[in-house]
Amino acid sequence: MPVNLTQNAVSAITAGDVNSKPLVQVLDIKLIGSTQERYRLLISDSVLTQHAMLATQLNDSVKSGRIRKGTVVQLIDYICSTVQNRKIIVILNMETIIPDCDIIGNPKMIGDLDTGVQRSVPDRNNGSATLTNNNNLGTQNSGRSNFSNNNNLISRNSGSNNVQSFRPTVQPAYQPPPIYKNHGAIVKNEAPARIVPIAALNPYQGRWAVKARVTAKGDLRRYNNARGDGKVFSFDLLDSDGGEIRVTCFNAVVDRFYDIIEVGKVYMISKGSLKPAQKNFNHLKNEWEIFLDTSSTVDLCPDEDASIPQQQFSFRPISDIENVENNSILDVIGIVISVNPSVPILRKNGMETQRRILNLKDRSGRSVELTLWGDFCNREGQKLREMVEAGHFPVLAVKAGKVNDFTGKSVGTISSTQLFIDPDFSEAHILRDWFDGGGKDVASQSISREIMPGGLKNEIRKTVSQIRDEGLGRSDKPDWITVKATISFIKTDTFCYTACPLMIGERQCNKKVARSGNSRWLCDRCNQEFEECDYRYLLQTQIQDHTGLTWVTAFQESGEEILGCSAKDLYLLKYEEENELRFAEIIKSCLFTQFMFRLKIKEEIYGDEQRVKITVVKAEKVNSSTECSYLLEQISKFSFR
């Protein structure tokens, strides 16, 4: 079928046109780049050719064969940049019009019109090449050179020389569209940069600018390496098209911009460099990251731009977090159902910080622990605690929380995390209506402990004797069961241990520590000393039912559920206050009390001996109403004759 490519398309694009959506033909494709796969194209408008780079998101169009040599395409989104004094077109979006087509016209490389040289262009019909020169054109055959002057063309085709006369075609001078006509001299590099969508940014562009809102601002961090001391901070941008990108500043650039940047404000940013994003520290969906330097400009836009959203979320249901990889960054929204007090935590570097744990639930039937660190504890954390204590359970949206898989799954704050209390958007309103309409009375299963597969509804009830008789825990995977039993004995000589309070990443070390020579506590794992240690339960308890008895071990959370107080409080009561009477009362209050024990049973090796270890995952006092309903349900399964 006859095809007409867009006349003067190459000249228009290199002159600055970005709106015409021209039809061009792909003459050549080359894979370049060793670290990052990119494709360079040679495109033609039938008269001129020009090199172009394909944006990485379009790589699949080449791999799948939708774009190949000869394909006619329509350029939808593109930009022309200058790289090392050479023009190159960056194609951001295009559509295939004709997948396979012969070479159209006799195109020349742009710039060769003035020199009179035409580069060779492959002939898809016979594989021959035509070499031309406007003054003297010829080919060499069988050791002889035949030249014609001015208007004669000699071409080589299938081994023969054919001399043809022709009248020269005069290429008309290019006339740019009206908006690109020359209006006077412009000083080099002083023309205002064109605003580019964040999604279209790439290292091949020359001058660019982005207009975007700051959605997050990281803390100012100091570091030391082989080149000396330094400081760094970063912030995240969101534009009206939904594109996001991180901006990073170092040293002197930090001094220029750290105090200027405010979360929620809109800025015009230009003259930065783009480098591959460091995905270990950058969770945004962008392969590039902006680095500002001393020549960069950051200008506050005084007028609010309603086209740019305040924030962009991608919420995950709490039930999905169970299957998310450790250290993943995600957004989550839920109802705050409990808020614990803030407690001081000593980090491995010797600095003290604050930690506060709260619980979120949503409509997925799951709840999750959210750990607040540092300023979040006394800022949003205290406000949430006061709201819950007053009987109002707020909606909390978490932007950029970090997943932790220590004893189940939990979410923690990082420097770029943002918390929104009772936000005004649809997801929050839906959650509020669900909770107030009965969701607050719906039971939810926590994913932040070592939870039995299948959850509570699919719990496996066993008796104490069945643990031994059925050989539970001796397979490759642990067995998870529920036992209704009574506590008959608790060891009180070693009910807890002194633990390291230092944080390793987002986890507490918890290694057993001992007194050093100067009365400070020493952790062998962290190789550090500190004034105060932590106290953690290691409760050895004997439980029994009508079939027998067994020993179980309860650690920190389950120990608190059994005894009703923290390990530190009980330790101080016995060893600091030496109140043996009160200590004995607490222990006796738990004896001969019936609990529903969720147990994890697994065979472990101690030295050369294999033992079955039974760990209490959760302990709840028996609820008479719930237990009666369960027993009636079990009775109904029997048929009486």
Image (cartoon, rainbow, N blue to C red):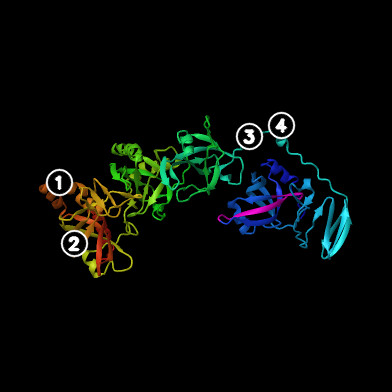
Q: Give 573 or 527, whichever is nearer the viewer.
A: 527
Secondary structure under the numbered disc 1 in the rendered image:
helix
Q: Are marks 4 and 1 in contact (CB under 8 Å)?
A: no
Amino acid marked by disc 4: Gly
Range of the magenta residues?
35-50
Q: Secondary structure at mark 2?
A: strand
Q: Which mark is residue 184?
A: 4
- Disc 1 residue type? Glu
| Identity of the residue drawn at 12% across and 50% down | 584
Q: CA distance from mark 2 to mark 4?
A: 96 Å
Q: Which residue is mark 1?
A: 576
Looking at the image, tell me whether mark 2 or mark 3 is earlier in sequence order: 3
Position above or below: 380 against 585: above
| Quadrant where the image shows the N terminus | bottom right
Side of 44 relative to 302 (left or right): right
Distance (Cα) linking label 4 and label 3: 13 Å
Three-letter code, disc 2: Asp
